[in-house]
Image (cartoon, rainbow, N blue to C red):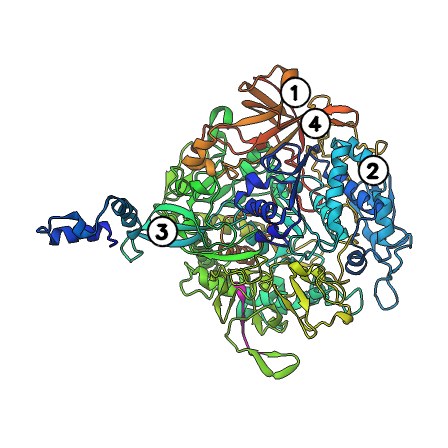
């Protein structure tokens, strides 16, 4: 008999009259195993990829909550994905600390601005952030966009605002970023991948 | 990687040089251990330090940082002088027999065509000799003095074991032992793999370091073979993918060379990038360039892109200059930039010469930092005492810090170093109000587009006309974007051989890049990724670990670009008749009717061996280039040049030519050249590197990693420590011409003094992982010390070899 802790509680509650643990199929060993079952039974397993080096190890992320609409998932454990043909369940000392990176005290939680000359951050809304940044971008683009070069050839470029892209972003984020930047005429564009 | 992680297990010899996989890529390095255990493979490590990779090697040899071409050039000399090459392979699959322009010369450290004032080569004399039909002339006997084989032999005749030892400091006997081990893999059924990383790229001769190794692999017949190849062990989990999406100035997604001022019309642009075959019967695959480019324009500009308007060619910005990261910070430092956006990138820590980067940021009007973590870059203006002295009141840059989600909090795909694209799934929401990079970019673009729609502005057409077919415009779903990257048919795509046969109906996802067209009937955001999301669905989400090949190919796990091919150039794993060089590790073979086997053939499936279609299909000549007539700005053959900060008085290979001390074609900005140190003031070679417990400047924010490596240190050898009176655990000050830092000294046997060009050279080892933010003890940014100069071809900064002085603090 293999019961989880929750089943165990149900069974014991229903069977107050029963006297013997043995009747429940119990012995000390399965009792220890139940603690682990209990934890896993409450988690949701999600397949993901370690973001550090380019071995790109498969990981299994365990979170509390079943991903239903109003349940906020909380990541409580990460381990190597045993099915992944490259890492086969292992993680290195970098990847072994992934949980602490996700929950790092350094995580940013809301948009902020440091005004010119100020010595502190000020919390702002996403709406404020997008509006202010979009105004900066547009003002710079409108003032410095180059339609034609000295020879009169059409060049349609903007080279006074630069962009550095992340190697930790997904292909989809990278592609969309590239599409938007060229669409704006940006040529001052580079990536971490160069260094 | 031309091959992939698991394939390392198929090697007979593993060379780790220019990297330290045991520390930087431990879970990939397991396949080296597997090769040793199962195949009795040998591991050779060449490195300035006795690294953790060296600790499990069969043979280790030291080398001076920045002298890899001297060492590898010596290997080429050894292979040619001792006739240890794979003759049939070299003759058939490389340009060894090709004739080069008679005007080609190499004299006193410079190739013909050098313009010292511009620091540039005119490559006219590096070109092939062509016959009347435009095909390269060849000499099958390999005896002509103008054929590549003879030119190469003459060039490397100077790289004797004595010269290698003089320049690289590697003891002669150690060097020869390694040459012997490498030479054994010239046998058709023996392969060597090379695992390198930033230890080769972060030099002013970085690209040529790698080219020298590629030449060795070609001479040995190791390209295209299981357990062979040239394998770059790259950085982040999606550094390969971001490179493929080409987020850099000079290329568009899929490595399509971006238009420049000289490309005035679409026709001119395409003509320059669509080569003609240089030998008869070759695939000359880049002849498809117009299909790739037109499909990209349809993905970006949708219905606005028509044949009549050149598929919006004019909307693409034209490039007039270099805009790589060093060029960007140079422009910023000169006050030519107003705004800057850093997405998941911490340049204050990652780019050379921190003081210059910081001064540049202070000249901006606005800076936007998008990151999951509080980075140093976002707080360049804040005073962190000795680690980042600053006066916020004097810095007028407006700085925005936007919280982004991390890998665990979003769907999407990453491409590993072996080109395998793997989908990942969101496990939880990000903290607080954090948003994904996709949503942040889309949100900003939505605002901008609305402003242009309302108020107009400079050239609004591409801003308003950019195709944006996402169901929720402010929040495109990663699945929608992945489908766009793959591409779809906009009209029925038919078989060119039988127009009645429809390959893809209008609206369907394309099965592969062979279905792309140049008439606007297909859209694809990145041709090399075409096939990742076909009508069969998201192939990057496949998770079948079964390996029916025995080689570790796992063809149904994820999707590898291109075309799910796991080993590039795999046609070269067979002889001219299509028979595997090593039947026990057959990758593909010709079965009498078609190519097939344990991989997707890198060859037209019905190309009969007797047609002579050669394996290097991306070159118009069909063969690999031992001699590179184009694409390398600093020479068609690699040559040893000193780092820009050399511990020697000159280049020992060219002692009498001051122009040939360091890479003559590397770009150096005024002011930086003067700042390079001389050995008399800064006598020690410094080199930066990574530790197993940390990843760049990222894991210092993770408590567990911070606990395991909490404090900044530098490593020095026992002999140098004795000379300077430094004991293990002392605090030391390390200075370069650009700044200084203090750290704990670790005195170790792992770093030893080398005899180079008649003098003793000491090395200071500098792990990079600390900064003024994070869970570790605060530390100095190591790039305070590094020089602002990059590789002549890639502009990757020279972090691996520069000069410092060191004393007890």
Which residues are drawn in magenta? B485-493
Task: Find the distance from the CA under tag 2 to the CA under tag 1.
Answer: 30 Å
As drawn, is B768 to the left or to the right of B662? left
- Dot 3 crowding, Cα within 10 Å, few <14, some 14–19, many 20+: many
Is B508 in front, or is B466? B508
- Residue at mark 4: chain: B
Task: Find the distance from the CA under tag 4 to the CA under tag 3.
Answer: 50 Å
- Let me know if residue B489 is in the magenta part: yes
Task: Judge if badges 1 and 4 mark residues of a common chain.
Answer: yes
Q: Height in image: B672 above or below B339?
A: above
> Label 1 belongs to which residue?
B720
Quarter residue B675 falls in? top right
- Dot 4 crowding, Cα within 10 Å, few <14, some 14–19, many 20+: many
Residues at circles 3 and 2 in contact by the CB criterion of under 8 Å: no
Task: Return the x and y of residue B605 as percentages of the image width and height.
Answer: 67, 71
- Residue at mark 1: chain: B
Q: Earlier in the sequence, mark 1 or mark 3?
A: 3
> Label 3 belongs to which residue?
B428
> Label 2 belongs to which residue?
B160
Q: Earlier in the sequence, mark 4 or mark 2?
A: 2
Task: Judge if badges 1 and 3 mark residues of a common chain.
Answer: yes
Q: Earlier in the sequence, mark 3 or mark 2?
A: 2
Task: Return the x and y of residue A12 as percentages of the image width and height.
Answer: 14, 50
Of badges 1 and 3, nearer the viewer stands 1
Of badges 3 and 2, nearer the viewer stands 2
- Dot 2 crowding, Cα within 10 Å, few <14, some 14–19, many 20+: many
Q: Quadrant of the C terminus of chain B?
A: top right
Q: Earlier in the sequence, mark 4 or mark 3?
A: 3
């Amino acid at each position: 008999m293999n019961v989880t802790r929750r089943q165990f509680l149900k069974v014991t509650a229903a069977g107050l009259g029963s006297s013997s643990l043995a009747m429940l199929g119990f012995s000390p060993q399965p009792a220890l195993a139940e603690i682990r079952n209990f934890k896993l039974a409450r988690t949701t397993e999600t397949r993901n990829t370690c973001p550090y080096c380019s071995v790109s190890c498969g990981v299994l992320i365990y979170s509390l909550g079943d991903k239903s609409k109003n349940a906020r998932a909380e990541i409580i454990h990460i381990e190597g994905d045993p099915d992944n043909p490259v890492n086969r369940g292992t993680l290195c000392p970098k990847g072994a600390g992934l949980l602490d990176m996700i929950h790092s005290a350094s995580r940013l939680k809301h948009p902020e601005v440091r005004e010119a000359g100020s010595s502190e951050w000020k919390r702002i809304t996403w709406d404020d952030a997008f509006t202010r940044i979009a105004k900066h971008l547009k003002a710079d683009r409108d003032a410095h966009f180059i339609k034609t070069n000295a020879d009169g050839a059409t060049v349609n470029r903007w080279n006074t605002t630069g962009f550095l892209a992340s190697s930790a972003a997904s292909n989809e984020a990278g592609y969309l970023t590239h599409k938007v930047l060229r669409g704006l005429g940006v040529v001052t564009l580079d990536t971490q991948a160069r260094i | 990687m031309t091959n992939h992680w698991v394939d390392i297990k198929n090697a007979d010899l593993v060379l780790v040089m220019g990297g330290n996989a045991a520390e930087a890529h431990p879970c990939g390095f397991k396949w080296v251990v597997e090769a040793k255990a199962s195949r009795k493979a040998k591991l050779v490590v060449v490195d300035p330090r006795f690294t953790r990779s060296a600790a499990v090697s069969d043979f280790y040899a030291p080398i001076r940082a920045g002298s890899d071409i001297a060492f590898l050039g010596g290997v080429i000399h050894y292979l040619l002088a001792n006739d240890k090459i794979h003759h049939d392979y070299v003759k058939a699959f490389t340009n060894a027999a090709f004739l080069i322009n008679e005007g080609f010369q190499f004299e006193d450290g410079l190739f013909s065509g050098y313009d010292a004032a511009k620091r540039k080569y005119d490559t006219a004399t590096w070109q092939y000799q062509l016959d009347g039909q435009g095909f390269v002339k060849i000499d099958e006997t390999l005896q002509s003095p103008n054929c590549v084989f003879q030119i190469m032999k003459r060039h490397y005749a100077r790289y004797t074991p004595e010269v290698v030892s003089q320049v690289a400091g590697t003891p002669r006997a150690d060097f020869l032992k390694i040459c012997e081990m490498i030479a054994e893999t010239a046998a058709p059924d023996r392969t060597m793999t090379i695992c390198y990383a930033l230890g080769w790229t972060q030099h002013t001769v970085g690209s040529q370091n790698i080219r020298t190794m590629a030449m060795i692999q070609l001479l040995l017949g190791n390209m295209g073979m299981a357990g062979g190849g040239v394998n770059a062990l790259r950085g982040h989990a999606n550094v390969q993918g971001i490179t493929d999406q080409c987020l850099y100035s000079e290329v568009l997604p899929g490595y399509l060379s971006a238009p420049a001022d000289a490309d005035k019309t679409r026709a001119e642009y395409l003509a320059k990038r669509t080569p003609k075959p240089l030998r008869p019967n070759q695939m000359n695959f880049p002849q498809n360039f117009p299909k790739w480019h037109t499909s990209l324009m349809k993905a970006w500009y949708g219905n606005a892109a028509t044949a009549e308007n050149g598929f919006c060619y004019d909307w693409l910005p034209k490039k007039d200059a270099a805009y790589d990261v060093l060029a960007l910070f140079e422009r910023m430092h000169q006050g030519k930039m107003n705004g800057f956006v850093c997405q998941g990138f911490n340049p204050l820590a990652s780019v050379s010469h921190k003081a210059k980067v910081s001064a540049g940021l202070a000249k901006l009007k606005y800076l936007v930092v998008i990151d999951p973590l509080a980075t140093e870059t976002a707080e360049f203006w804040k005073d962190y005492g000795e680690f980042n002295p600053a006066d916020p009141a004097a810095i007028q840059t407006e700085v925005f810090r936007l919280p982004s989600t991390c890998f665990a909090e979003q769907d999407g795909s990453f491409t590993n170093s072996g080109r395998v694209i793997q989908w990942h799934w969101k496990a939880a929401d990000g903290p607080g109000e954090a948003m994904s990079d996709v949503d942040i970019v889309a949100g900003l673009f939505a605002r901008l587009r609305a402003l242009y729609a309302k108020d107009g502005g400079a050239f609004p057409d591409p801003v308003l006309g950019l195709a944006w077919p996402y169901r929720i415009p402010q929040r495109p779903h990663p699945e929608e974007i992945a489908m766009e990257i793959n591409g779809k048919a906009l009209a029925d795509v038919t078989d060119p051989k039988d127009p009645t046969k429809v390959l893809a109906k209008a609206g369907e996802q394309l099965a592969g890049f062979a279905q792309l067209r140049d008439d606007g009937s297909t859209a694809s955001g990145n041709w090399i990724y075409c096939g990742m999301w076909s009508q069969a669905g998201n192939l990057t989400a496949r998770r079948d670990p079964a390996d029916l090949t025995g080689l570790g190919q796992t063809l149904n796990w994820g999707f590898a670009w291109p075309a799910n091919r796991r080993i590039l150039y795999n046609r070269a794993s067979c002889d001219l008749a299509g028979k595997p060089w090593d039947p026990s590790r057959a990758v593909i073979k010709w079965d009498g009717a078609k190519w097939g086997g344990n991989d997707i053939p890198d060859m037209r499936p019905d190309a009969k061996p007797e047609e002579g279609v050669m394996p290097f299909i991306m070159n118009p000549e069909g063969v690999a280039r031992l001699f590179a007539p184009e694409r390398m700005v600093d020479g068609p053959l690699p040559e040893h040049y000193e780092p820009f900060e050399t511990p020697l008085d000159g280049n020992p290979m060219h002692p009498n030519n001051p122009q040939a001390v360091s890479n003559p074609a590397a770009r150096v900005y005024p002011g930086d050249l003067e700042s390079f140190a001389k050995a008399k003031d800064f006598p020690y070679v410094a080199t930066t590197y990574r530790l197993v417990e940390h990843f760049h400047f990222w894991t210092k924010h993770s408590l567990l990693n911070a606990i395991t490596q909490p404090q900044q240190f530098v490593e020095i050898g026992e002999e140098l420590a004795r000379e300077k009176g430094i004991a293990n655990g002392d605090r030391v000050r390390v200075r370069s011409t650009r700044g200084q830092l203090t750290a704990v000294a670790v005195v170790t046997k792992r770093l030893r003094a080398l005899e180079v060009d008649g003098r003793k050279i000491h090395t200071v080892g500098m792990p990079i992982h600390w900064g003024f933010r994070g869970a570790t003890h605060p530390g100095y940014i190591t790039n305070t010390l590094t020089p602002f100069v990059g590789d002549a071809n890639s502009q990757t900064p020279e972090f691996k070899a520069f000069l410092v002085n060191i004393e007890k603090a």
